[in-house]
DNA sequence: AGCGAATGGTAATTATGATTACCTTTGCCT
DNA sequence: AGGCAAAGGTAATCATAATTACCATTCGCT
């Protein structure tokens, strides 16, 4: 039994490695050309797996895209949770949230390129993974802390504050990629965050 | 000669009316189902024109989408220029810019739905109509006024200020549609704008 | 060695729909 | 009336790929 357990574990490892390769290929290919212009065979070749493997793992082309996307966003979420550890001050927590996003996308520009080239927002949403629940949840959680502490403005509903943050993040990253990633995004994290903070913090009279 | 001129004018009028019908159909259909799931025949039927007419007017399916999108954004730009007339105060001008966008999308929710269902940001960009130059230009122009007057923050480059505004706008509208357009967006325009203003105006010590 | 699961390779299967070609109809102008 | 220009209708073209089916191969385990 031990041995077969180990075998299963090995297989799981293998699966994980293969999935990683596939998801990397997804990123590369769908970032360059749009979803409907890419055949699955191309992904298969780029990932060094067969077509059947992809179908066994993901079931369909669309699922392949969204599961992969979710996997990448999951990594972002994980990194964020990791980085938030040990930070107490509320403003600094939020700053970190902001920073991790910029940093992650700067390290993985293909992720945003893929989103811009191959993801219809609506279709994504219907896959129940809209903006990744884990990621979204972390944002929401940090934000709520601030509300409870009375640090965040209450002139508008919470959801709009969230839109504010997410909107700025998305656009800044998107345009950074769009402009060819010439300058460092992370270098702008602090001034941008200070702007954002002025917007969403409760005005102190 | 007069008569034939009139005839040409009539024809141009007809063209305009037909185009309007087609572009309305584009909005309706591509808002509901994504670009690649819709056949052109369906658009033709919805607009009460023949397939050939569409090809004569637009040349291809993709052009149809982007020309239509651009036409709608052109209307937004026109409305904005119209509304800006006579407003002197800089902050009020910017507030108006913000308001017109929310108002326009609230009146035409299908526009955002179409963007979310059928427009890949990258593909759009490649069509040289990214975010509509006219619209974009108006934003930029108003923004620059503020920079010159020293009212807008200079802690980050101008482009980031623009990203801030556009990002917030896009996200707020997008999520409004996403959430089912239950409450009025325009009703939130002022508090949202005040938040934005705090972010982008030069802090007064 | 021999089994079994997972994978690879190749070739159907099947839709699907964009784009064209061609011919008919309509409506206006001279 | 006769003719032109725009629009409609129908049926090719022509690709293009997603999805399946089927069979061969590999590799670890017993």
Image (cartoon, coloured by chain):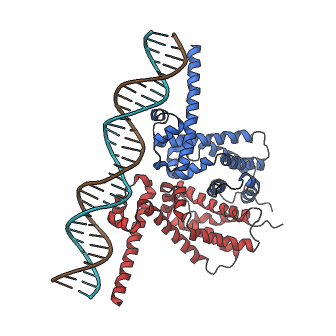
Chain colours: A blue, B red, C cyan, D brown
Residue B151, image x, y percentages: 75, 71
Q: Can residue B33 be seen in the rendering of this structure?
A: no
Figure check: A35 above or below B47: above
Residue, far bottom: B2
Q: Position of residue D18 (x, y in %)?
A: 42, 42
Horizontally, residue B182 falls left or right of residue C1, namely right
Q: Residue at x 57, y 55 (%)?
A: B175
Viewer-side residue, A180 vs B190? A180
Q: Residue, x 58% and y 67% (percent of image)? A: B101
When asked about the image quadrant of residue B140, the answer is: bottom right
Q: Quadrant of residue A168?
A: bottom right
Q: Position of residue C30 (x, y in %)?
A: 27, 88
Any part of residue A171 in sight: yes
In the figure, is residue B87 to the left or right of A26? right
The quadrant of the picture occupied by the C terminus of chain A is bottom right
Determine the residue positioned at 52% across, 70% down: B74
Q: Is residue B171 left or right of residue D17?
A: right
Query: Of A4 and A131, which appears nearest the observer?
Result: A4
Residue A88 location in percent, x, y?
79, 43
Quadrant, the N terminus of chain A: top right
């Amino acid at each position: 039994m031990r041995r077969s357990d180990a075998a299963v574990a090995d297989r799981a490892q293998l699966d994980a490695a293969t999935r990683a390769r596939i998801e990397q290929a997804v990123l590369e290919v769908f970032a360059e050309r749009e979803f409907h212009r890419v055949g699955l065979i191309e992904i298969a070749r780029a990932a060094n797996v067969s077509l059947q493997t992809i179908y066994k793992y993901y079931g369909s082309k669309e699922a392949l895209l969204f599961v992969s996307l979710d996997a990448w966003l999951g990594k972002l979420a994980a990194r964020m949770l990791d980085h938030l550890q040990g930070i107490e001050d509320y403003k600094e927590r939020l700053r970190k949230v902001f920073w991790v996003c910029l940093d992650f996308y700067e390290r993985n520009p293909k992720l945003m390129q893929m989103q811009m080239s191959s993801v219809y927002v609506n279709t994504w949403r219907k896959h129940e993974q809209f903006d990744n629940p884990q990621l979204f949840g972390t944002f929401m959680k940090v934000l709520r802390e601030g509300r409870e502490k009375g640090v965040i403005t209450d002139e508008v509903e919470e959801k709009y504050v969230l839109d504010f943050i997410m909107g700025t993040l998305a656009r800044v990253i998107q345009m950074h990629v769009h402009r060819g990633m010439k300058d460092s995004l992370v270098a702008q994290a602090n001034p941008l965050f200070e702007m954002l903070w002025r917007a969403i913090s409760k005005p102190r009279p």
